[in-house]
Each structure stands twice: as C-alpha cells, then as structure tokens.
Amino acid sequence: MEKGLYNISNQHNKKFYTLIEEDKITLHPAIKTKDGWLANTDSASAIYLRPDLANKEPVKFITRGFDLDVLTILFKYRPYTAGFPNQLNTNFNAAGYIGHRSDYYLLFYDKNPLNAYQRRISHFAYSLGFFGGIGATNINPFVTSNQIQSEYDGVVITKGIVGLIGVGNLTFGAAIGFDHLMDKNHKLWIYQGRPWAGFTVGLNVN
C-alpha cells in the first residue's frame, strides 16, 4: 500500500489523501477542483499504530482506476464443434489487457505476545476489461473437416473479455474469447470466430 487517494470505509467512503508512516496513517480530506483532486492539509486525522479497541472491524482503503496487464491464457476450452469433440488447448499465446480495476487494502491490528499491536495490511483487487493478442494453434485434417492433409502450427489473433482477481502484481482470471486464423485456411478451420472459455494468469504493469 502506497500513499495516494483512497476511499475509506470508516469515513463514510469519502476520499482522502493517505500518507503511510511507520507509526500512523494520516488522512487528509481530498477536495475535487477543476484541476483535479487536492489534499486539504489544514484538516487531518490519523489512524495510529494502537487501534481504537472499540472498533473491531478492519479499516478498508479502496482505490479505483485504469488497469493495464500482460497475460497469457493457460488453457482454452473449446466446445463440441462440427462433429469434433470438446477440446482443451494449451498452445502458446500472449496478450495485452486493458480494463477498470478496484484495489482493496484491509487494515488490521494484531496483538503480539508482548501485548503490543502490529499493523497488518491485506490486499486484493478485481478488474474487468478486454484483451487482445497473438497465439498458435494446431491445424490438421481433424480441425478442417479433412479439407487439408498437412499439419502445422497456425498463427491466430485472439481477443475477448476477462475478469481478473489481483494478488500483489499477479492477476488470475476467467476469459471468454474468439480466435481468428491468419492464413489462407481460415475459412476451413472449424473454430474460426467461435467462442472459447479459458483461464488466464498475468502481471499488472501500471
């Protein structure tokens, strides 16, 4: 968790500029102006290392914004098509992702054996958006209804929508996508433009 603008659960979800220090977290109310958000440094409150024991609930810090990831689809599940049974494909692919992300930081205070409190922050995020990239697929007589006799790895353009869950900088998600073969046999490929479902893993880059 870094300093910045957050909505805070125990402050009626108002927006604050939050400064993270070793023994306290200082909250400056944020004011929306025509030039953007500004911190009101004349008014501040602090969440100290020792918590208010009357409040047992964790404090939730929320930030939302633009999300940019690189990801790969670990596998694609293709349903029954043109007499060919269900398939689970693990061919190479790489994609870029753009979407909207919400990050949640949960602030806890744990009492240690020395009867002192230690601050602990748990983080998770979720995001929804679009991906697009390039990949490979097996082209053979089976997936072309026996209209070609050769076998090779074809290049596909892949695209779709994906929902992601973030843990640190890593993301994991479920996707629905479509592939388009980029050679002369695209009209023969039984999966051309047909939907698939898959599982993704990626890295947040912003």
Image: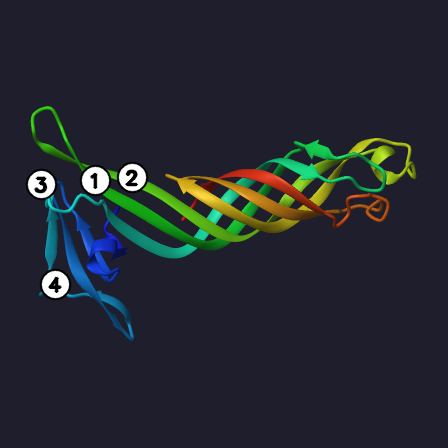
Disc number for residue 108: 1
Image marks 1 and 3: residues in contact by CB distance under 8 Å: no
Image marks 2 and 3: residues in contact by CB distance under 8 Å: no
Measured in 3D between alpha carbons, the distance from the residue under mark 1 to the one under mark 3, in whole angstroms, is 10 Å
First in sequence, mark 1 or 2: give its number.
1
Near mark 1 (Cα within 10 A), the count class, few <14, some 14-19 or many ≥20, is some
Label 3 secondary element: loop
User: In the rendered view of the protein, which quadrant contains the N terminus?
Assistant: top left
Q: Which residue lies under the disc numbered 4?
A: 41
Number of on-image labels:
4
First in sequence, mark 2 or 3: give its number.
3
Image marks 1 and 2: residues in contact by CB distance under 8 Å: yes
Amino acid type indicated by mark 1: Phe
Q: Position of residue 174 (x, y in %)?
A: 55, 42
Amino acid type indicated by mark 3: Arg
First in sequence, mark 3 or 4: give its number.
4
Image marks 2 and 4: residues in contact by CB distance under 8 Å: no
Disc number for residue 59: none
Disc number for residue 122: 2
Near mark 4 (Cα within 10 A), the count class, few <14, some 14-19 or many ≥20, is few
